Amino acid sequence: MAKVKVYGRVRDRIVLGIAHAYLAKHPDASLDELNEAFPNELNSTLKDGEIFRLAGETNGMVSCGKEVPSPGILTLANGKRIEMVVQWSDEDYSKLKEWVKKDDIEVEEPPKSMEIPGEGFSIERMEPTLNETEGKAIRGNREMTNRQKYLLYLLLTLLLLFSILLFSRGNSNDVDEITRYRNIKQTEQKIDLHRIAVEQKRREKEICDLCQDEEVRLAEEMTKSAEEALNTLIEQ
């Protein structure tokens, strides 16, 4: 999945931006899934409840029991409105930033020239690198190498058959004829087995290519959905 960077200058707004970034990558996440993704151990100031709570249950304030308005409200895909705990110590904030890196979410210091929106944070989706494409090209080159090996084995088999035929041509007795016939049959069997193996490899590659194409298609669809969800969240 694509990496997402969060920019901001105020801690509680950056934390909210992290939550928005997670929802952009997981647009169908539920409240329970959010609290599973962000366990209570990340915030030492929690006295009860979870990091994320329904906005209706907090009367618009989620701040570990203190009467401080939360920096914003998030809307889930199912329409539920939730809020996030706003108090984060220096240690907890550092833990949170490290924690979300496993989901390819990183907090970056914004350049002085960057204009931060009114919600206090900005989210930037990083385009995938060419590593995956290069990896596919390397696998393609490796596959060509294997094909060359198959052709070499086939050529050696044919040379062996040709040598057997030349050797057998000079013998006229029945024993030699029987031996030659057996050798030819054995060689033909080896060629048939080799041909079957080559065909099996070809079919496996076709299936692998189809699977990779399907993965790319699904990735593109998920990326498109994530972008649409992100745009919707930003517009809200």
Image (spheres, helix red, strand yellow):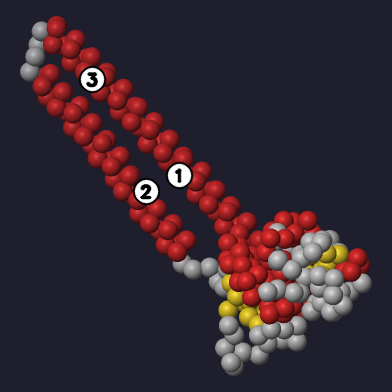
Q: Is label 2 in contact with label 1 (beta carbons under 8 Å)?
A: yes
Q: CA distance from mark 2 to mark 1?
A: 9 Å
User: Residue 93 at what x, y percent from top left?
Assistant: 65, 72
Against 129, residue 160 (above or below) is: above
Residue visible at 44% across and 57% down?
A: 136
Quadrant for residue 89, please give it: bottom right
Report helix, strand or loop for mark 1: helix
Residue at 75% in and 83% down: 119
N-terminal of the pair, mark 3 or mark 2, is 2
Position above or below: 147 against 4: above
Q: Quadrant of the N terminus?
A: bottom right
Residue 143 marker: 2
Q: Nearer the viewer, residue 161 or 200?
A: 200
Residue type at mark 1 is Lys
Q: Tell which of 71 and 1 is nearer to you.
A: 71
- The label on residue 94 is none
Few, some or many residues within 10 Å of mark 1 (<14, 14–19, 20+): some
Structural crowding at the residue carrying mark 3, measured as other residues with C-alpha within 10 Å and reported as few (<14), some (14–19) or many (≥20) = some
Dot 3 corresponds to which residue? Answer: 184
Q: Residues within 10 Å of mark 2 (few under 14, many from 20)?
A: some
Task: Check disc 1 and report the residue beneath it.
Answer: 205
Of circles 3 and 1, the one toward us is 1
Look at discs 3 and 2 and give the one toward the viewer: 2
